[in-house]
Image (cartoon, rainbow, N blue to C red):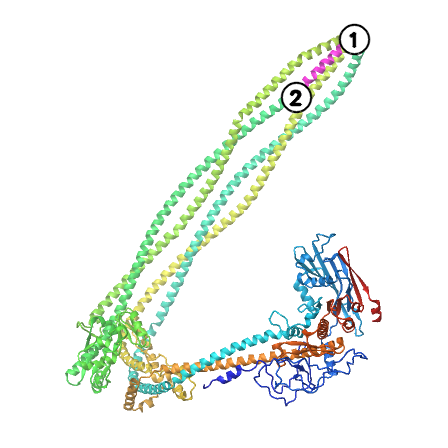
């Protein structure tokens, strides 16, 4: 396949390439990555045989043996090798050997598998006769150990078990030695539970500790039947191993305590240094310290030591572990496995992608080749078409040169006329400028008036709001003043009452003091007189004994009655006071009701007055609104009528302009045709046929369509060039106007046959019925294939189809081939074609009399419009006054309503107060029963008092009689003394009565003073609060009045400014009217001069139209734009074509018709048409847009027009007759681009696949190199360990497939002393144990772990082997801690520390013993 970057044979070869390849002569040194070790520092020999790209894999097991330093490649050693055995260094060989180990050597190769082929040859490896020496191996060990040496390591100091399995309570197991400790004890004592406790802390499941659930780990015995939890704490410390073989605790690193606690609900918690943690954090911490929790190298349980050596060479499942995976994890190459698998998957996917892209590439290549022939034909057609376009361009440019010479003379005349018009305009330029200034001033004044009106409205609203605020504040002021007057009146009367009460109280207190003094004196006198009386009575005791006893008895009987009389007197005084208070309260309440009723009557009167005022104002406002509403309706109606008048006026102005223009054109047309007809009749010319539009007829419905689509119907038809030249000379000579001619003898023969049109719309040419068939070519030359559509929608569908058409609608909308849309508007072209009903197109023609009539009507309409405009303005002013007065009335109404609302609220409050006062008075009056009760109670008390006096009167009379008897017995002396005593008693009683009365009055006066003082305080507080509030309100009222005054000032200023601005506007209006008269005079002069220019402009329009048609023909010429397509073709043959069409998209549309109907553009006619000249576009450029060159005037004059027309006919025939699909170039360009893209995609895919292959090779090589480096170290160490342990045996790790260590895995072969090579499965139990221990020790030496826990690993060993293992642990593993559970004294007697375990009462305990003998020896 051509151009394919990857052939099928190459793909097949790449698919057969091996996954792992080694380059010949690779001299790259092995770098040290993680556990990777340099096996040799020398480069390989350059004469190694080349590695084949493919090979057949063999699974025959071969030994990999390291070569010497001259060759670092591994090689396979067959079983019949005659080379010397590899001498493994014995680190502690015995000096003498009874078994002759130094004299005998055994084959170190394992037995060949039964399926191994004896003829197999390995082409990738060389055999080396030299093996590594002891010194080189020692260097490897030292280098590796130095790279993995640690400063300090972790060791278990002690275990703290609490209720764990057989350990009840809190038990401390330990301390353990930093290197070698042994746990001893009888069977069943709980030795293995020590290991279980470690497993428990390290996160193992319960089944690993020989239990089903975590709760089963909790101790349970008769003494402790229901414990809820158990825990184990492992106390770690860091130790530094000295070079002397001793160790010391690392004081810089703190100890570490990891605890796990299990509960009855089978849950557990972890703690690090007594802080709660998680399983993840604990395991992460232990792994960081080097404890292998993944493969559990630190743990060798009872009966599991043999399983290490019996691992399969490679795991059968991903979830299993084989010896290969075991070693890869330790060496560290297992990290490469996911990356390698990922790359292999990527290669498989990329191979599929490459195959898919190659298939697509082949398909595109075939398709591209199939388009080659069509491409060449299309390119030839494009070249011919380009030549035809260039020839037509030259012919058009030649015709344009002739037309422009005619244009120059016409422009000169127009320039002169325009200069005259400009001179007239300059005379009135100042007037126009002044009019603009006046208009600007009026606009500014109008804006200021509008701003004043807006400000006036704002001020009215502001005043309304301020008035409302003022009224509200004044009402609040009245209320506060009234309240203060009332409070001050109350304050004054209260002060007077307090003064009277205080004076009365002072007087009563003086009387009280005076009475108390008198009573004191009388009391002393009474005592003195009574003492004398008693002495007299004592002298008469015997005589009056019985009488005195009788008196005493009566007096005792009278005592309760006296007490009752005193109580009744007190009750009578209280009732009299209560009666007085009730009568006083009723009088005050009645007076308060009368005062409030007087106030309510006054407020009601004021309220009625306000309501009458509001009603009157609302009537005025409604009348104003009705008047304003009617005014707005009248103004709106007048404004609409004014707009209608303006529309009619504008239409009339347009009609007048059209009439003037039509009259001018008609006069010119009529003059030309009349003069030429007379010339034809006189026989001076032959072949004149008249207007083209008059030489045929068309249906009335297509009048607008043909008049819009073909303005050249006004062209004059003649037979020959000579006839046309005679006509032009005659018109020029007699200054009759201008005309454009169609020369029948110069018209080419067009194909006039009907054509197929979209939607079967008619062709405009087919609708014309010429008077004579010879005029058909003339009609076709101006109409071409223009189609007629019923509406614009159909026109769009037809014009923009697969083939573009020029389409016109029946209502005069035209869509050109270029897509330009024109037509429509107010003015509709019609009447250019003679109609089938023989109607003339004179419908739109105007006579001079009609034009004069239209001008008079226009003037009358302008006067009427001016009067109507003034009337509308006056209506607007009156309406504005009504609108301005409306806010004043609304403000007055709002003010009155606010005052009425305030008065209503006051009235409501006063009525509420009256109701309350009346209710209080009614209640007081209704409490007459209470008054009656008090009066009846007073009468009852007086009656009871009288009754009591009546009751005591008899007894008092008896006592009086008995006392009289005593007086009689005592004689005059006793009577006189008794009279003195009674006189003093009477005086004393009178004074006591007076004192009681004074005290009662004093108490009442004191109560009045307190009551009046409280009332005084309330009144003073009310006065103070009202005064403060009144000050605030007065301040607010002051600001409000100031704001109102400022508002009035602003309102007056605004109104004055508004009046002033209106006066200024009126003055400017008068000036404007004066200036308009001057402008109208200028317009009259301007119209006259424009009429003079009309004829010249008509001639100019004809010439410009002719040039436009020629320019249009030139602009429509373009070389087909295939620049983009040719640019996509990567072919040198197309450079010339691409060069010719590179500017094809630059042709613009600036050469269009310069015809204009607007008189305002006459001034620019000369300039625009000068720019229009095709020779002036870019005379300094060799090319114009669309890749067509512009020729200079000299070049155009030298053209052979007849030769050009001949070539045009020849090339036109070729282009019309040749059927070529130009689209094949685009298709070919697309296919070529797709071909290149597919080729690039294929190359990128192959490159990406090769890059991934290279990455895969690098990953495999890294994995292989690093694995083999670690594997060889471990294998050599294993030899050493096993030889040392067995005293002469040999063991080896070897690859099942020596070419690919990862395909079949690793086997463990052992040669026990004096025996041949055997598989591990064929060994005895002791030999399996020794092999496993040798592997464990070898792995420890390669990658040490700080902790090893072994449970009865010596169970299957004999006495000698136990001693060997124990001595190795003691002597050679001082960089790790070994905790060994053993029942063999050969083992535990060598431990530095012994932990004894024993059981008593189903509870395990422990004790620790230092092995003094061993420690002393150490």
Q: Residue at x 47, y 79 (%)?
A: 357
Q: Is residue 567 magenta?
A: yes
Residue 859 located left or right of residue 1004: left
Q: Is residue 340 magenta?
A: no
Q: List the residue tagged with mark 1.
A: 543
Q: Which residues are magenta?
A: 544-569
Residue 1233 located left or right of residue 647: right
- Residue 269 picture location, percent across and down: 67, 59
Q: Quadrant of the C terminus?
A: bottom right
Q: Quadrant of the N terminus?
A: bottom left
Q: Are marks 2 and 1 in contact (CB under 8 Å)?
A: no
Q: Residue at x 77, y 8 (%)?
A: 969
**Residue 1256 shows in this picture:** yes
Residue 520 located left or right of residue 348: right
- Residue 1288 picture location, percent across and down: 75, 78
Q: Secondary structure at mark 1?
A: loop
- Residue 1310 picture location, percent across and down: 70, 77
Q: Nearer the viewer, residue 1011 or 385?
A: 385
Rounded to the nearest whole Å, what is the CA distance between mark 2 and mark 1? Answer: 38 Å
Q: List the residue tagged with mark 2.
A: 567
């Amino acid at each position: 396949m051509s151009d394919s970057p990857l052939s099928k044979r190459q793909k097949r070869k790449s698919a057969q390439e091996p996954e792992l390849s080694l380059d010949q002569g690779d001299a790259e040194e092995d770098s040290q990555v993680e556990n990777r070790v340099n096996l040799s520092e020398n480069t390989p020999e350059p004469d190694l045989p080349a590695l084949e790209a493919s090979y057949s894999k063999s699974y025959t097991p071969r030994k990999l043996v390291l070569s010497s330093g001259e060759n670092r490649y591994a090689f396979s050693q067959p079983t019949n090798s005659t080379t010397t055995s590899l001498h493994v260094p014995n680190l502690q060989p015995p000096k003498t050997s009874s078994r002759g180990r130094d004299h005998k050597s055994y084959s170190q190769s394992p037995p060949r598998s039964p399926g191994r082929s004896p003829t197999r040859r390995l082409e990738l490896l060389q055999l080396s006769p030299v093996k590594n020496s002891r010194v080189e191996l020692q260097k490897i060990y030292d280098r590796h150990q130095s790279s993995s040496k640690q400063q300090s390591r972790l060791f278990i100091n002690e275990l703290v078990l609490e209720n764990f399995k057989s350990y009840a309570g809190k038990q401390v197991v330990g301390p353990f030695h930093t290197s070698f400790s042994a746990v001893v004890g009888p069977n069943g004592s709980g030795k293995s539970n020590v290991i279980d406790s470690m497993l428990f802390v390290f996160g193992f499941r319960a089944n690993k500790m020989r239990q089903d659930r975590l709760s089963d780990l909790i101790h349970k015995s008769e003494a402790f039947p229901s414990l809820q939890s158990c825990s184990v704490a492992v106390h770690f410390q860091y130790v530094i191993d000295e070079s002397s073989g001793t160790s010391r605790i690392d004081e810089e690193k703190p100890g570490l305590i990891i605890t796990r606690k299990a509960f009855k609900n089978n849950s557990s918690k972890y703690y690090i240094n007594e802080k709660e943690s998680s399983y993840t954090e604990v395991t992460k911490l232990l792994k960081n310290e080097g404890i292998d929790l993944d493969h559990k190298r630190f743990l060798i349980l009872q009966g599991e030591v043999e399983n290490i050596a019996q691992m399969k060479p490679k795991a059968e499942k991903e979830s299993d572990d084989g010896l290969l995976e075991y070693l890869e994890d330790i060496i560290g190459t297992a990290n490469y496995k996911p990356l390698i698998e990922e790359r292999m998957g990527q290669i498989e996917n990329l191979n599929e992608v490459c195959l898919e892209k190659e298939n697509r590439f082949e398909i595109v290549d075939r398709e591209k080749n199939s388009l080659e022939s069509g491409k060449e034909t299309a390119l030839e057609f494009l070249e011919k078409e380009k030549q035809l376009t260039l020839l037509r361009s030259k012919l058009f440019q030649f015709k344009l040169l002739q037309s422009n010479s005619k244009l120059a003379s016409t422009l000169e005349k127009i320039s002169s006329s325009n200069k005259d018009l400009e001179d007239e305009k300059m005379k009135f330029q100042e007037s126009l400028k002044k009019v603009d200034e006046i208009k600007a001033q009026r606009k500014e004044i109008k804006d200021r008036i509008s701003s004043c009106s807006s400000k006036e409205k704002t001020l009215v609203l502001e005043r309304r709001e301020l008035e409302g605020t003022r009224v509200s504040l004044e009402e609040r002021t009245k209320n506060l003043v009234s309240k203060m007057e009332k409070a001050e009146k109350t304050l004054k009367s209260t002060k007077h009452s307090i003064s009277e009460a205080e004076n009365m109280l002072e007087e009563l207190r003086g009387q009280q003091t005076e009475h108390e003094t008198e009573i004191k004196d009388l009391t002393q006198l009474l005592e003195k007189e009574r003492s004398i009386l008693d002495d007299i009575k004592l002298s008469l005791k015997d005589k009056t004994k019985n009488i005195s006893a009788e008196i005493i008895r009566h007096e005792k009987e009278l005592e309760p009655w006296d007490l009752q009389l005193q109580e009744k007197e007190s009750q009578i005084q209280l009732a009299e006071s209560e009666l007085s208070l009730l009568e006083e309260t009723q009088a005050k309440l009645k007076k308060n009701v009368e005062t409030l009723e007087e106030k309510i009557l006054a407020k009601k009167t004021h309220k009625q007055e306000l309501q009458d005022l509001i009603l009157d104002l609302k009537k005025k406002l409604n009348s104003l609104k009705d008047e304003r509403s009617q005014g707005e309706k009248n103004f709106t109606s007048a404004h609409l009528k004014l707009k209608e008048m303006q529309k009619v006026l504008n239409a009339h102005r347009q009609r007048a302009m059209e009439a003037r223009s039509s009259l001018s054109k008609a006069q010119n047309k009529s003059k030309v045709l009349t003069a030429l007809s007379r010339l034809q009749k006189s026989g001076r010319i032959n072949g004149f046929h008249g207007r083209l539009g008059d030489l045929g007829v068309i249906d009335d419905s297509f009048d607008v369509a043909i008049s819009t689509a073909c303005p050249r119907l006004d062209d004059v038809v003649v037979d020959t060039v000579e006839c046309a030249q005679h006509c032009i000379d005659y018109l020029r000579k007699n200054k009759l106007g201008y005309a454009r001619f169609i020369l029948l003898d110069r018209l080419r023969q067009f194909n006039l046959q009907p054509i197929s049109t979209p939607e079967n719309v008619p062709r405009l040419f087919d609708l014309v019925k010429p008077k004579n068939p010879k005029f058909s070519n003339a009609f076709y030359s101006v109409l071409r294939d223009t189609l007629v559509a019923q509406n614009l929608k159909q026109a769009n569908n037809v014009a923009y189809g697969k083939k573009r058409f020029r389409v016109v609608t029946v209502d005069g909308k035209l869509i050109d081939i270029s897509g330009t849309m024109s037509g429509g508007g107010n003015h509709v072209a019609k009447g250019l074609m003679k109609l089938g009903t023989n109607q003339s197109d004179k419908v739109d023609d105007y006579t001079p009399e009609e034009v004069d009539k239209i001008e008079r009507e226009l003037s009358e309409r302008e006067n009427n419009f001016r009067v109507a405009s003034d009337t509308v303005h006056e209506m607007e002013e009156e309406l504005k006054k009504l609108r301005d007065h409306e806010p004043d009335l609304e403000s007055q109404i709002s003010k009155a309503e606010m005052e009425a609302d305030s008065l209503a609220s006051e009235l409501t409050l006063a009525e509420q107060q009256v109701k309350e006062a009346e209710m209080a008075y009614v209640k007081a009056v209704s409490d007459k029963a209470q008054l009656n009760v008090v009066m009846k109670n007073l009468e009852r008390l007086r009656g009871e008092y009288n009754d009591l006096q009546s009751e005591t009167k008899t007894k008092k009379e008896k006592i009086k009689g008995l006392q009289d008897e005593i007086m009689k017995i005592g004689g005059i002396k006793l009577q006189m003394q008794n009279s003195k005593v009674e006189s003093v008693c009477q005086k004393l009683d009178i004074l006591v009565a007076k004192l009681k009365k004074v005290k009662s009055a004093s108490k009442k006066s004191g109560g009045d003073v307190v009551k009046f003082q409280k009332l005084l305080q309330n009144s003073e507080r009310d006065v103070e609060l009202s005064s403060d509030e009144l000050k605030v309100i007065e301040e607010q009222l002051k600001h409000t009045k100031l704001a109102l005054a400022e508002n009035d000032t602003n309102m007056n200023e605004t109104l004055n400014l508004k009046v002033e601005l209106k006066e200024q506007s009126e003055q400017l209006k008068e000036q404007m009217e004066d200036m308009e008269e001057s402008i109208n005079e200028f317009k009259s002069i301007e119209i006259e001069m424009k009429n003079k220019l009309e004829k010249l402009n008509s001639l100019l329009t004809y010439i410009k139209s002719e040039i436009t048609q020629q320019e249009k023909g030139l602009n429509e010429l373009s070389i087909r734009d295939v620049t983009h397509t040719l640019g996509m073709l990567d072919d040198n043959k197309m450079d010339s074509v691409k060069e010719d069409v590179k500017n094809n998209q630059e042709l613009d549309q600036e050469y269009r018709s310069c015809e204009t109907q607007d008189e305002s553009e006459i001034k620019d006619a000369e300039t625009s048409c000068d720019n229009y000249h095709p020779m002036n576009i870019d005379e300094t450029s060799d090319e114009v847009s669309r890749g067509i060159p512009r020729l200079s005037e000299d070049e155009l004059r030298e053209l052979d027009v007849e030769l050009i027309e001949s070539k045009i006919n020849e090339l036109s025939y070729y282009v019309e007759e040749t059927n070529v699909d130009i689209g094949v170039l685009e298709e070919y360009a697309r296919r070529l681009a797709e071909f290149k893209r597919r080729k690039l995609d294929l190359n990128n895919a192959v490159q990406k696949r090769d890059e991934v292959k290279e990455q895969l090779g690098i990953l495999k090589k890294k994995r292989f190199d690093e694995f083999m480096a670690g594997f060889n170290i471990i294998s050599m160490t294993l030899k050493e360990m096993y030889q040392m342990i067995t005293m002469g045996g040999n063991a080896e790790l070897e690859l099942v497939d020596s070419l690919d260590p990862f395909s079949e895995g690793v086997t463990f072969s052992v040669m026990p002393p004096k025996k041949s090579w055997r598989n591990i499965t064929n060994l005895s139990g002791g030999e399996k144990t020794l092999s496993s221990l040798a592997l464990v020790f070898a792995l420890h030496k390669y990658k040490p772990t700080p902790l090893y826990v072994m449970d009865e690993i010596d169970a299957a060993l004999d006495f000698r082997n136990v001693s060997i293992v124990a001595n190795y642990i003691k002597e050679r593993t001082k960089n790790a801690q070994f905790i060994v559970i053993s029942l063999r004294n050969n083992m535990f007697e060598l431990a530095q520390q012994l932990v004894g375990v024993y059981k008593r009462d189903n509870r395990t305990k422990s004790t620790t013993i230092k092995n003094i003998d061993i420690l002393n020896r150490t």
